[in-house]
Amino acid sequence: MPKCPKCNKEVYFAERVTSLGQDWYRPCLKCEKYEKTLTLGGHAEHEGKPYCTYPCYAAMFGPKGFGHGGAESHTFK
């Protein structure tokens, strides 16, 4: 039986949510930064850990700066 990557307990078929190639308990599938419960399709992965797509993943790992990618786009470090 598969184990939840967060709590390491066995995940029963009726309770599992499959995401990022693993089976999770629904309450365990949370954003690594804000602990927000994630919905299927509404999150992204970085180094095997789930993050909400917006704002966490976009802010932490997306393109830096502001604007819409045109001449007004700037990057700050």
Image (tube, rainbow, N blue to C red):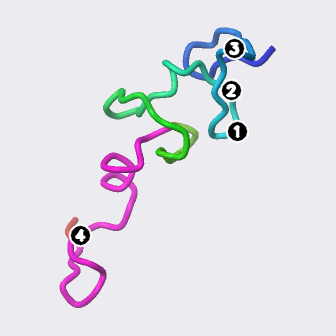
Q: Mark 1 or mark 3: which comes first in sequence?
A: 3
Seen in the image, is 51 located left or right of residue 77? right
Q: Which residue is mark 2?
A: 23
In terms of image quadrants, where is residue 26?
top right
Which tag, 2 or 4, sits closer to the chain's start?
2
Does the CB distance between marks 2 and 1 fall below 8 Å? no
Q: Secondary structure at mark 2?
A: strand
Mark pair 1, 3: CA separation: 14 Å
Q: Quickly name the residue at label 1.
A: 21
Mark closer to the observer (4, 3): 3
Alpha carbon separation for disc pair 2 and 4: 35 Å
Identify the residue under disc 4: 65
> Label 2 to label 1, Cα distance in Å?
7 Å
Residue depicted at 31% across the width and 31% down the height = 34
Q: Which residue is mark 3?
A: 11
Measuring 48% from the left and 44% from the top, which residue is drawn there?
43
Which amino acid, by three-letter code, is at mark 1?
Gly
Mark 4 Cα-neighbour bin, 10 Å: few <14, some 14–19, many ≥20:
some
Determine whether 50 is above or below 5 in the image.
below
State the residue in front, 18 or 56.
18
Report the quarter where the N terminus lies.
top right
Above or below — where is 9 with respect to 16?
above
Q: Position of residue 53 (x, y in %)?
A: 41, 49
Q: Amino acid at mark 2?
A: Asp
What residue span does the magenta drawing correspond to? 50-75
Horizontal relation, residue 24 to residue 36: left or right: right
Which residue is depicted at the point 36% across and 27% down? 35
Could you tell me the amino acid type at mark 3? Val
